[in-house]
């Protein structure tokens, strides 16, 4: 039987102070419509996996959850966590662009960031 980690810690997925603060702000701005932010992983191929975030109303039974004093709540399903384990989520605002950044994701999955040669240039 597979056991799932219900409590997500910074050892599983590091979340910087900037990211925690922004996630808490975004959740507050929904005025109760969302209770958490879900991190997801999709895609693949030469460009690697795509990492994203969306609002969530609740965690599923197999999700790992990170709650913080600042009022943020992150949920991650087991598939996404397998690609994010050991990575870092940061929020960067340089005055022109503001975005969440996923750092060390190649390290988290043991990849090198290099193309393995799928034999095609476009799909």
Image (tube, rainbow, N blue to C red):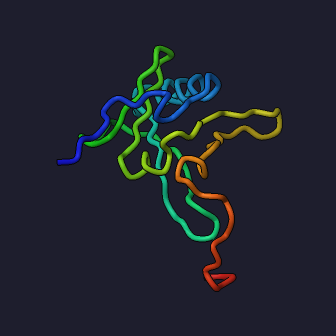
Q: In this view, does 49 lie above or below 39?
A: below
Point 31% across, 36% down: residue = 5
Q: In this view, does 69 lie above or below 108?
A: above
Q: Is residue 100 above or below residue 15?
A: below
Q: Is 9 left or right of 108, judged from the image as shown? A: left
Closest to the observer, 62 or 5: 5
The x and y percentages for residue 85 are 48, 42
The x and y percentages for residue 45 are 57, 70
Q: Is 29 left or right of 46, judged from the image as shown? A: left
In the picture, which quadrant includes the C terminus?
Answer: bottom right
Image-quadrant location for residue 7:
top left
Point 61% across, 27% down: residue = 16
Closest to the observer, 122 or 83: 83
Which residue sits furthest top?
69
Q: In this view, does 17 lie above or below 58?
A: above
The x and y percentages for residue 84 are 50, 45
Point 68% across, 65% down: residue = 114
Which residue sits furthest bottom?
119
Closest to the observer, 12 or 58: 12
Q: Is 88 left or right of 77, judged from the image as shown? A: right
The x and y percentages for residue 103 are 64, 42
Q: Is 39 left or right of 95, judged from the image as shown? A: left
Closest to the observer, 79 or 68: 79
Point 61% across, 22% down: residue = 17
Image-quadrant location for residue 120:
bottom right
Q: How many marks?
A: 0
């Amino acid at each position: 039987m597979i056991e799932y980690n219900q409590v997500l810690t910074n050892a599983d997925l590091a979340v910087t102070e900037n990211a925690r603060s922004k996630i808490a702000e975004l959740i507050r701005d929904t005025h109760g419509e969302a209770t958490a932010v879900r991190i997801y992983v999709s895609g693949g191929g030469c460009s690697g996996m795509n990492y994203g975030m969306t609002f969530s109303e609740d965690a599923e039974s197999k999700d790992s959850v990170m709650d913080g004093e600042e009022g943020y709540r992150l949920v991650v399903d087991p598939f996404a966590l397998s690609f994010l384990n050991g990575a870092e989520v940061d929020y960067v605002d340089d005055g022109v662009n503001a975005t969440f950044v996923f750092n060390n994701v190649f390290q988290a999955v043991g990849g090198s960031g290099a193309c393995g040669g799928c034999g095609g240039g476009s799909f």
